[in-house]
Image (tube, rainbow, N blue to C red):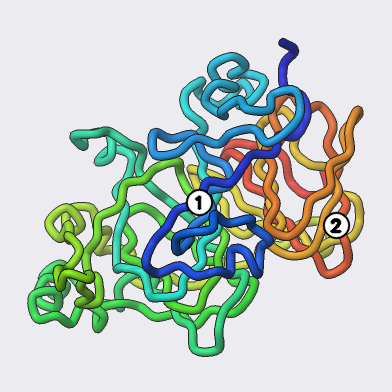
Amino acid sequence: MFPPDQPLRFQPLFRSYIWGGNRLSKSLGKKLPDDGIWAESWEIVDHREGESVVDSGPFEGWTLRKLIQHFPIEILGENTPNERFPLLLKYLDCQRVLSVQVHPNDAYGAQMPQPDRGKTEAWYVIEAEPDSVLYAGLKPGVGRSDLENAIASGKTEECLHVLRPQVGDCVFIPAGTVHALGAGLVVAEIQQASDCTFRLYDWNRVDKDGQPRPLHVQQALQVIDFESGPVHFAPRTSTPTPNECLLVACDKFRLMESRSTQPTKLPTNDFAIVTIPRGVAQIQTETSTMNLSRGDSILIPAACSTANMQLGEDSIALIATPPYSEWSFGN
């Protein structure tokens, strides 16, 4: 079998939660299963909780795990350890406010009974109802004892820093940051490939049997970064190319946004994830042309020597790369 040197399209994996709706279908064109309340679409993932499966082409039916096992350098590049794919891309439809939670860092995750990566993530707002909010970090001056007292008295929300998002806003959530997505939001999320979450507060909700969902307060208190304080919207860092910017640059990934209708040369030598939260795009390589619509996502393997993107009018592309990738717009 020849190595994968073309963009790979995967079947989305849907996750059902009580806080989902149908906007994954209406807004992003996802073909949802007939039954269930579908809140998450995992677009690209290589984790024990879910495996992306190639949708079409010569590797149709292969999992991303199998591809990396057979072609580690061709998929990941020479700079990424030949382990599981390090990032996870998902879309979320939040019809209800999510639980207040926090994710551990890599060191804590590695010591858990079922070891996992830590979880640093970033949200990109695709839709926001007028009164939507999200919670990112603790208010200034809130320490551990303040939070513990608030939890004990059922007033956790009084400690949370509130943001009022608009479409196109990006929020960076490092591991150790208390956070929650509010109702009325559709977001794209790029994160470490981890499913490690500690639930701190669930808004005093109960299930159909009158029972609250389990909380993980002590674990959460151990991993919260009480020095980080409130989180604000990520600044847009200009690049040499108009209508293209860097949203997040951290030690886990880089996230960039393009609104340019000019041809864009996409990364090579390292892998890249491309997703289209609005509009349409066309990806051209030396041997193929791939058309993407709103909600479509692809993985560009490191072995893909040439990949150029053309966005349609009023379209947006998000591009995620490894943190060490030397690619940037205009190169």
Residue at 53% across, 17% down: 69
- Residue 131 showing in the rendered view: yes
The answer to which of 239 and 262 lies nearer the viewer is 262
Residue 224 point in image, percent of width and height: 25, 58
**Which residue matches tag 2?**
311
Residue at 55% across, 45% down: 253
* Camera-nearest label, 2 or 1: 1
The amino acid on which the numbered mark 2 sits, given as a three-letter code, is: Leu
* Label 2 CA crowd tier, 10 Å (few <14, some 14–19, many 20+): many
Q: Name the quarter where the C terminus is drawn.
A: top right
In the rendered structure, the answer to whether residue 155 lies left or right of residue 299 reads left
Residue 107 point in image, percent of width and height: 28, 38
The answer to which of 98 and 134 lies nearer the viewer is 98
Residue at 22% across, 71% down: 208
**Which residue matches tag 1?**
14
Lower sequence index among marks 2 and 1: 1
Residue 299, relative to residue 122: is it above or below? above
Extreme-bottom residue of the structure: 131
In the rendered structure, the answer to whether residue 212 lies left or right of residue 321 reads left
Residue at 45% across, 38% down: 50
Residue 239, relative to residue 325: is it above or below? below
The answer to which of 41 and 7 lies nearer the viewer is 41
**Element type where label 1 sits in the image:** strand
**Element type where label 2 sits in the image:** strand
Residue 96 point in image, percent of width and height: 40, 75
In the rendered structure, the answer to whether residue 264 lies left or right of residue 51 reads right
Residue 125 point in image, percent of width and height: 58, 69
The amino acid on which the numbered mark 1 sits, given as a three-letter code, is: Phe
Q: How many marks?
A: 2
Pointers 2 and 1 in contact (C-beta within 8 Å): no
**C-alpha distance separating marks 2 and 1:** 27 Å
Q: Name the quarter where the N terminus is drawn.
A: top right
